[in-house]
Image: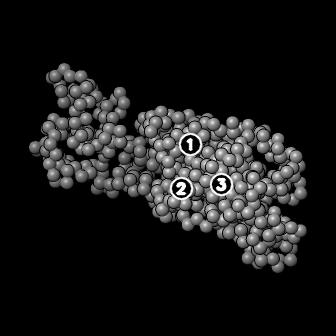
Amino acid sequence: MVRFGPFAVDIRTWRLSRDGDPIELSPRLVEILVYLVERNGAIATKEELLDRFWPDVHVTENTLARAIADIRKALGDPADQPRVIQTMARRGYRFVGVSAAEAATGDPFRLWVEGRLALESLDPTRLDEARAAMEAAATAMPDYAPAHAGVANACVVGFEATRLTNRPDVQRLQAALAAARRAAEIDPRLGEAWAVMAHAQALAGRRDDAQAAARRAVALEPDSWRHHFRLALASWGEDRLRAADRALALSPSCAAAHLLSAMVFVARGAWDRAGAEADAGARIQDAQPGMAVLPVAGLHWMRGLVATATDRMDEAIAGFAAETEQSSSGLFAREFRWLAATSAGFHHVRLGRRNEAVTAFELAESLNPGAARGALGLQLPSGDSPLMDPSGDSPLTKRAGGLSPGARAAAVESALDEMASGPKVSDATLIRAALLAWTGRPAEACDLLDMLLRTAPPGPTAWSLAADPMFLPLHGHERLRPLLLAIASRAA
């Protein structure tokens, strides 16, 4: 008896059944099916199959194609999303299901499915589970490209879980690139292999390579909203807007595509368009169920940025508050809650609201301890008084263990050095510029930002300069406008 998934074949009679119920299929076609199953994922070429099953008859490849189509129909296995038999373009066919032997070692295909479900939950507590499941599936099925693509996805998501820290885990990103390349080598026509490769390359700053890989994924599977979304992620300017629009056309609930588009409009200073994208995405974010697949976050933070840029301070703070109050536990929820908390804190400092600033930066510190952006907020002035005064008597000083101003300044420098030693060099430069601006040196801040824009490769560097409350002291400064025009030009 040969078994795979819910199917079984009695090789004495060449009868196929599913969960014990017989399925009508000719003995020759059942024999072809068993031959593919017993090859354990190895490709059976067209010539090999024709020679074995039609040895004395002159038939064309169309005969074989019809035979495979009949087998698929009997199994309920669609050719465009195969679970049992996969077509290898111009080469042949291979079995991609799970045999009884594989099931005995833990059912690697089920592991792959479970790993994918864990990933799509974007639950940070399930990332190790997802990666372990994908790696087990890839080990058990070394020639199964989707398993390696699954490993790459698990590593990408694992990297993104560390993205808000001063020094993200680049080893996970390298592992993602290696697994994605392996998936593409095994099956160059697997769109997901190129899509996840694009995602990893974009996170690594290799935007040209990322766009090329994403475009290949889109060419292979043009109706996949995920591939268009990743093309948007890898792109900037008009290219990002087109890809995001296509992702939304295919999946109108893809709120993250609204976020990506809003970033471009913020960089361009197109506030009405940015606000419309943020509002549309926020409606989706608010309507998502508590256990949503691929939960989204960040749209209320984006609304706060747009309000900041257009001098609607109370509305901005309300937007940031709405983000920090979101109940989602998805992967990006903590990152955007942290960004919203620091954004609110900078507003409160600018407005001289010391207690509110203390509360906001304390929340930020609890969400992302030691992060440079939050550390900057902890040492900023509020009105004429330090937020954490030298006496050690301020509320925040007591909560933070009585750190002196010198220790707080050292904490900022340590955090910035940590960022600069990893993949966040540009982010460290932005925070240094903000520090200069808040300490009464706006011209020096603008010099540093100008240098950054002149040396940064094409892409979204400093895209939020006009809207991020971290740069409120630069608003109205004569040197700001040329910088904003340069950022807008980069987003064309």
Q: At label 1, which amino acid type do we have?
A: Ala
Count numbered badges in the picture: 3
Mark-to-mark CA distance, 2 and 3: 14 Å
Residue placed most toward the observer, 43 or 269 = 269
Compared to residue 172, the image places residue 144 above or below, namely above
Mark 1 is surrounded, within 10 Å at the Cα level, by few (under 14), some (14 to 19) or many (20 or more) other residues, namely many
- Left or right relative to 121: residue 104: left
The secondary structure type at the circle numbered 3 is helix
For the question of whether residue 126 can be seen, the reply is: no
- Left or right relative to 352: residue 228: left
Residue under the point 41% across and 37% down: 187
The label on residue 244 is: 1
Q: At label 3, which amino acid type do we have?
A: Met
Residue placed most toward the observer, 226 or 276 = 276
Residue placed most toward the observer, 424 or 172 = 424
Q: Which residue is mark 2?
A: 284
Q: Which residue is mark 3?
A: 302
Residue under the point 76% across and 49% down: 466
The secondary structure type at the circle numbered 1 is helix
